Amino acid sequence: MLLRLLSFITKLFLLTLAVGILLYLMQEKIPARFFYEPYKALLLFFFGVTLLLHYGFERSFAKGSKHFIRFYMLASGLKLFAFLTIIMLFAFIDKEHLPAFAMNFLFFYFIYTAFEVATSYTKFGASAKPVEKSNDASV
């Protein structure tokens, strides 16, 4: 599991680096009202959230597919709710920069969610088989 996690961290780091470089190069071309200046903090936030979720996916997958499905659905729902809460709180704290923050947050959400789904499908998809723990003693 550690080797798979290190592989995922490497891929996640490369994605974060690529997105960071892209935004750095494009910041002069993006209108100021749509560019959130401290985007690096958002990059670190999404890196951390994606890493924690993937670690949870790995652990739940090891317990069996039923645990994985429950964890995936619960984590996805809680993540969406938490992200909406963050945007709403930002709206109360800093209305002036809300459009830029929301646009950048949505951009990162789509990028990191696509990455998470793609890597989850390749690791935990239909071809992957966890070790099922059977509670049935009648075998």
Image (cartoon, helix red, strand yellow):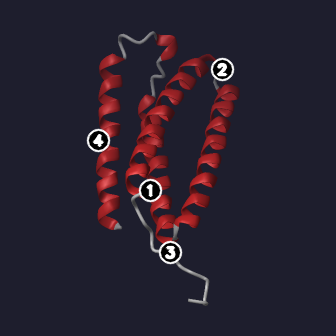
Q: Earlier in the sequence, mark 3 or mark 1?
A: 1
The span from disc 3 to disc 4 (Cα, nearest Å) is 33 Å
Using the image, determine if residue 111 lies above or below residue 95. Answer: below
Residue of label 1: 126
The span from disc 3 to disc 1 (Cα, nearest Å) is 14 Å
The span from disc 2 to disc 3 (Cα, nearest Å) is 50 Å
Residues marked 2 and 3 touching at CB (< 8 Å): no
Tag 4's secondary structure? helix
Task: Determine which quarter of the picture holds residue 88.
Answer: top right
Res 84 label: none
Task: Determine which quarter of the picture holds residue 96.
Answer: top right
Residue of label 2: 95
Mark 2 crowdedness (10 Å alpha carbons): few <14, some 14-19, many ≥20: few
Out of 27 and 61, give the one closest to the viewer.
61
Out of 81 and 96, give the one closest to the viewer.
81
Residues marked 2 and 1 touching at CB (< 8 Å): no
The span from disc 2 to disc 1 (Cα, nearest Å) is 45 Å
- Work out which quarter of the rendered image holds the N terminus and state it: bottom left
Residue at figure coordinates x 67%, y 26% from the top left: 91
Task: Determine which quarter of the picture holds residue 14.
Answer: top left
Residue of label 4: 14
Q: Earlier in the sequence, mark 1 or mark 4?
A: 4
